[in-house]
Amino acid sequence: MTSIASLAKAARLTRRRDVEERLWDRMRAWLVQQERAPGIHASDLLMPRRGYWRMVAPVPLSDREVGLFLVGRVLHAFLLEQGALASDEGQLREEQLGLYYSPDRLSKDGRWVVEVKTHRGLREPTHSGEVETYVRQLLIYLACTRRQAGMLWVLYVNLRDDQGRTCPQVRCYELRLSERGVERAREALARDLASLRDAIRQGDPSALPLCPEWICSERLCPWWHRCQPEGRYPTVEGAVRAPRRGGDPPDPPVSTEGPLGGTPAGAAGVP
């Protein structure tokens, strides 16, 4: 007697690349539907060298980027629909600095900045340096808003549980600054902006810090051959170009040292 199981085993699937392309085009259009205002955005300062190239030689999102960004946008849309995010703040501008930024939420009481992220890592970070890009972005938002309390909501899509199984899990981390810490962040932000603007004006990104090694490669960077990152890009002879100036980028201006964790979101009150 025929069963669904036997029919399924005998079924023949035909891949429809034309349908995939249409879906991918729709996803790409959804991601870019909110056009960015011309100028420097907070995300450009997370990796200033990449921000430089985005400004002087913009390229469309790759299929890989569409897939990666889609997960975060879907999570953001869900939290917004469920009321966990009171609103999507959209694109804001810090007039004194001349910087655009897009926080996920600013609490109405004037205290909190909330940023939502997704992460594909298999284990929870033990130190803020392991999610440094997230911390930098939150610091930029705190500097722009002059707020002292920030929250990271991170969906780890492949986090291992205590039995070694992978499953999506949420972690919430708190970051607090003193008034002086906020001012130091604003001072550092102004310097970083000036450096990026100088590089754009001069048409030379060599004074900007290199991007993290995990993204600085021919495979992941569309500007690899134009940027030719010092110390990483092979010359015609097969050697690697030596750094032209400077060294490693300076430490973050505001200390975020120590293990991640802070005050649990429930204990502090979800902002």
Image (cartoon, helix red, strand yellow):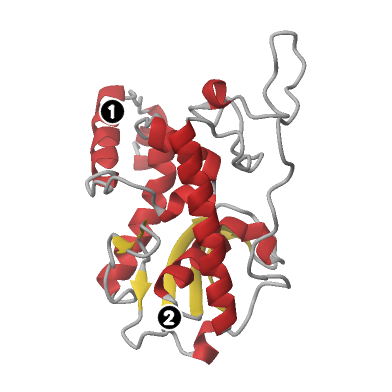
Real-space Cα distance between discs 1 and 2? 40 Å
Give the left or right position of residue 117, taking residue 163 as reference. left
Q: In the image, what residue occupies the spot 36% across and 57% down?
A: 98
Does dot 2 land on a helix, a strand or a loop? strand
> Residue 67's spot in the image, x, y percent?
40, 41
Say whether residue 165 is visible: no
- Looking at this rendering, what residue extends furthest in the top direction? 237
Say whether residue 220 is visible: yes
- Label 2 packing within 10 angstroms: few (<14), some (14-19), many (20+): many
Q: In the image, what residue occupies the spot 59% across and 41% down?
A: 208
Place residue 216 in its image quadrant.
top right
Identify residue type, mark 1.
Glu
Give the left or right position of residue 154, taking residue 129 as reference. left
Q: Nearer the viewer, mark 1 or mark 2?
A: 2
Place residue 126 in its image quadrant.
bottom right
Q: Quadrant of the N terminus?
A: top left
Q: Quadrant of the C terminus?
A: bottom left
According to the image, label 2 marks what residue?
A: 112
According to the image, label 1 marks what residue?
A: 21
> Residue 204's spot in the image, x, y percent?
53, 31
Does dot 1 land on a helix, a strand or a loop? helix
> Residue 158's spot in the image, x, y percent?
57, 55
Q: Could you tell which of marks 1 and 2 lies nearer the N-terminus? A: 1
Identify residue type, mark 2.
Trp
From the viewer's perspective, is residue 171 above or below residue 123?
below
- Label 1 packing within 10 angstroms: few (<14), some (14-19), many (20+): few
Q: In the image, what residue occupies the spot 33% across and 69% down?
A: 79
> Residue 22's spot in the image, x, y percent?
23, 31
Disc marking residue 142: none
Q: Nearer the viewer, residue 32 or 193?
A: 193
